[in-house]
Amino acid sequence: MSALEIKNRNELFTPEIRAEIDHEIAKYPEGESQSAAMAALRIVQDANGGWLTQESMDEVAAYLDLPPIAIYEVATFYSMYEHKPVGRNKLCVCTNISCMINNSDQIVEHLNNRLGIKFGEVTEDGRYSLKEVECLGACGGAPMMQVGRKYYENLTPERLDSILDELE
Amino acid sequence: MANEVIFKNRDLDNLWDIEQYRSRGGYEILTRILTEKTPPAEIIDGMKTSGLRGRGGAGFPTGLKWSFINRSAPGDKYLVCNSDEGEPGTFKDRDILRYNPHALVEGMLIASYVIDAHRAYNYIRGEFWEPYERFQNAIDQARAAGFVGKNILGSGFDCELNVHLGGGAYVCGEETALLESIEGKKGQPRYKPPFPAHVGLYGCPTVINNTETLASVPTILREGAERFRDIGVENSGGSKLFSISGHVKNPGVFELPMGTPFSELFELAGGMRDGSKIKAVIPGGSSSPVIPGEIMMDLTMDYDAIAKAGSMLGSGAVIVMDESTCMVKVLDRMGYFYHEESCGQCTPCREGTGWLYRIVHRIENGQGRPEDIDLLMDVQNRIRGKTICALGDAAAMPVAGMLRYYQDEFQYHIDHKKCMAGTGA
Ligand SMILES: Cc1cc2nc3c(=O)[nH]c(=O)nc-3n(C[C@H](O)[C@H](O)[C@H](O)COP(=O)(O)O)c2cc1C
Ligand code: SF4
Ligand code: FES
């Protein structure tokens, strides 16, 4: 491992992050720290700009005393973990039934046109990326999307424009 | 509304605050149970009398489920709440977490007492960050008030309550996949038997209940099991949260007595939008077979009535579609969903959902073949009843439902390589 990689590792696993992971481990019975794997990956992903590097997954495995494969399996099974860079604002647009029949196609098209990217892509300035997601349990507000921790419901192209402008 | 259970006190501004929740009798029944040391069997009897059936989709009687736990068996027991809410069309548990989280905290503590669990987890889907914060705040408040933790209210009963956040996988709503996920693994369903009541979380006896199920418990026990039962109808006790979405004017979550006519729910949701006409209804989440609007208008919202019409009440998620809706496109999108979300463990589901999706997708895109309708029926038949978990059935059932009522649309797509007149996108 190069000196730079070691430095990155230590920067990622700050005392604050360790404390956060320890807090998660404490939720589970003694000897069941694997249960904290999902939370640990989430915490590390958030600290790393929204995606997981191989090194960060290895580090999580080492911290929880698990074989790396156990962590890779989890990190690739669940859709909220990312394995390549995402935008500072990851726009997760629901296109499932209730949203679809409420014109989510139009929302997607508007985003494609305005940002010049498709699902799975990142804008050149790194400000936005676009992701198609399944029903987010907010069908009463269809069409809708999630950005970061927040839901945006009852979207229209106009509303979308003002939301995009507000997202740094 | 007089018969509300979950949304009863929604008129209070900050019902999520413990002071507000307690101002209408919140935590009274938990306190009574713990100080009087009510025999668990008595509580189970009450739950049986109430007629409460699991609100997660399968409708299994809650009292009966709790009775399967052998309290005197050595070792730990667990209570797990299912707030994974991923069935397309369903958005009621999110509102419970946001607006009445203490009802869930209290219900989880009572259930834990009944089965002698000293640890309980609420599995909340990872996307529900704001609802999670509300719920976590409720736990923290309950702990500060002495309802969570060691020796609750001096009763000698200990119970820790924690949240486990999901990571984005519909299949984790299936109860054994959910347990795997709490254990920090891929969410792949387990073979049953053994059932979770015997071998559940960390190999210990476990009860898994839906958010709405558990949040109903305090009111049922406080106001009386008979009272709850009588709100509903035979075989469907109590009230139920209905998530209604699609082409209605005022989509939302409504709590109504079981057995309420669909037409009433429909009216509460404002009827159709922009003077459009109703075409079809998915009555219980995307896994439940579609029912034409005119049949739906004569049905009541309870387990038996919807089952008799060939569908399922499921999670109470009602998706209303107007006349412009293309059924091929709807089934295409569903097919994509189930194929994406199949965990891949069993061949009939992994391969079958792929087949279903590819066939419907080519019909939708004007490349359907004359044999495709028979092929669809054949493939869905080969999935049903042949898989480890019910996701396979959930993917297959809507196909048969669509073909039962809307085969002509599929045929038209195949013959003319486009939509039938009147059905747009
Ligand atoms: C694919 C699949 C997804 C499911 N998703 C959910 C869900 O999101 N929420 C839920 O409560 N139950 C869900 N269930 C049902 C659960 O397996 C289980 O029956 C339920 O949580 C039990 O609680 P109840 O008896 O209170 O309904 C799902 C089942 C399957 C097969
Ligand atoms: S039915 Fe599908 S989702 Fe369920 S275990 Fe089998 S492959 Fe996995
Ligand atoms: S279909 Fe989009 S939130 Fe449910």
Image (spheres, rainbow, N blue to C red):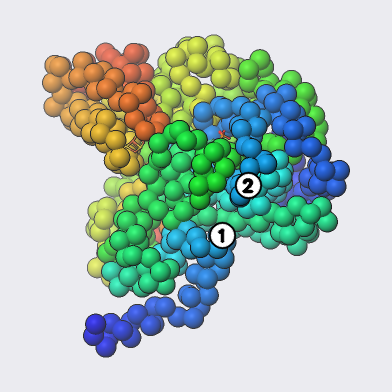
Residue at x 63%, y 47% (from the top left corner): B74
Q: Could you say where residue B247 lies in the image, as x and y percent from the top left?
A: 45, 30
Front in this rendered view, residue B153 or B420: B153
Residue B385 visible somewhere in the drawing: yes
Tell which quarter ligand 2 is in. top left
Mark 1 = which residue? A29
In the image, residue B137 sits, relative to residue B286, either above or below, namely below
Residue at x 33%, y 86% (from the top left corner): A7
Q: Could you say where residue B188 lies in the image, as x and y percent from the top left?
A: 37, 44
Q: Quadrant of residue B177?
A: top left
> Is B300 left or right of B46, judged from the image as shown?
left
Q: Could you say where residue A110 lies in the image, as x and y percent from the top left?
A: 31, 50
Front in this rendered view, residue B136 or B242: B136
Disc 1 element: loop
Which of pointers 1 and 2 indicates the residue nearer the eye? 2
Mark 2 = which residue? B74
Q: Chain under label 1? A: A
